[in-house]
Amino acid sequence: MKITFPHMGNAHIAIKALLAGLKLEVIPPPPITKRTMELGIKHSPEFACLPLKISVGSFIEALEQGADTVLMAGGWGPCRFGYYAQVERDILKDLGYSFRMVVLEAPDFKLSELLNQIKDLSQKVTTLEAVQATRFAWFKLNAVDRLEFCLAKMLPRVINKEEVLAIYRQALQEIDQVTTRPQVNQVTNKSTAEMEQLQQHDQPLLRLGLVGEIYTILEPACNYDIAEQLGRMNVEVYRSVYISDWVNDHLLGGLVKPSNRREILTSSRPYLNYFVGGHGRETVGNAVKLARQHYDGIIQIGPLTCMPEIVAQSVLGEVGEKEGIPVMTMYFDEHAGATGIQTRLEAFVDMLQRRKKSNQVWEQGEQLNAHVPGC
Ligand code: SF4
């Protein structure tokens, strides 16, 4: 069996470790390129949301490299995600590819059910080995998130942006390659320390919250890497979704590490009181929470036609007014252009800077810069 899976940010590092630990031959999805996008767009329905198109392109490239099994997540709820696996399978079969699709359904917060599904992927390992593989993948997932968090903190602060990005990229490569927990720890500690030691400027920073649909937030190719673009403008970006938090909240019942999900859902009231699919309610809750933490602005992102984010957007205007925070929404599809996106980001940042100056709150911003928690 040669197995592949969807590309989503840096999650491939942990998923690859999990599947390798199950003694499966892994064909990791290649990085998303222009060709990936073109393949997905060509073969998917025009009205499908961008993550589906990217996944189709990514699966085609992995199948071309010899994959014969595709691992995909299932889902339920009011949005289209529950149909993704079936639609993708039909598209790829119609194109003539011969493969097996394995769909991992949401385990309804039952750890044993998740482990059973993982164990069922491979007949070559014992239950104990499957547990060990899962634990090691979880360990790598957290290490990657720690690096991403550190980059978000340091990129706007350091003078030489290329240096911090180079350390980050090198660290990701090393974490992907190492095979033991001490090695993962060693790479993460060394790289975060190196990032923190780089020379920093003393300019005040803007603090901005990035909320929205999970795939668009986690996959830079889907959002034109707006977190990096903002970091280069000396804007500190608080990302509302990290993949380890999502796994903890949605697959592990919030049992493995502290969870702020309840707080986020509580914050969404009274603006949005019920589940609308995807991350719609979390988008609203995070926006409220960040406004009350005196962030300077919120950017909501999602794929064009994403139903949960459209619902969230419809109440974010009221959130912005009542909580006193500027909110900008950006949708992405294959027609988005890098220059247009950069122009919108620059205009929003410029407006936030003027607003902050006119409110005379730079002093508070400077204090915030001085008390930065470690990576
Ligand atoms: S959450 Fe949005 S992008 Fe994701 S499947 Fe649902 S509608 Fe599509």
Image (tube, rainbow, N blue to C red):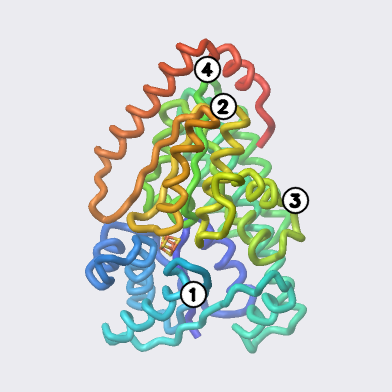
Kindly tell me whether residue 156 is visible in this rendering.
no
**Which residue is rendered at x = 39% and y = 59% of the image?**
31
Of the residues under marks 4 and 2, which one precedes in the sequence?
A: 2
Q: Specify which label sits upstream in the sequence, 3 or 1.
A: 1
Q: Cβ–Cβ below 8 Å for labels 1 and 4?
A: no
Disc 2 residue: CB within 8 Å of ligand 1: no
Does dot 2 land on a helix, a strand or a loop?
loop
**Which secondary structure, mark 4?**
loop
Q: Which mark is residue 210?
A: none
Q: CA distance from mark 3 to mark 4?
A: 31 Å
Tag on residue 204? 4
Between 39 and 280, the one nearer to me in the picture: 280
Which badge, 3 or 4, comes first in the chain's sequence? Answer: 4
Residue on which disc 1 sits: 72
What residue does disc 2 label? 198
Q: Is mark 1 within 8 Å of ligand 1?
A: no
Report the side of 177 relative to 65 (left or right): right
Neighbourhood count class around disc 1 (C-alpha, 10 Å): few under 14, some 14–19, many 20 upward? many
Q: Amino acid at mark 2?
A: Leu
Distance between the Cα atoms at labels 1 and 4?
A: 43 Å
Kind of residue indicated by mark 1: Met
Q: Position of residue 69 (x, y in %)?
A: 46, 82
Residue located at (75% from left, 51% from top)? 258
Foreground residue among 157 and 317:
317
Which residue in the rendered view is the most extreme toward the front?
270
- Residue at 49 percent of width and 78 percent of height: 3
Residue on which disc 3 sits:
258
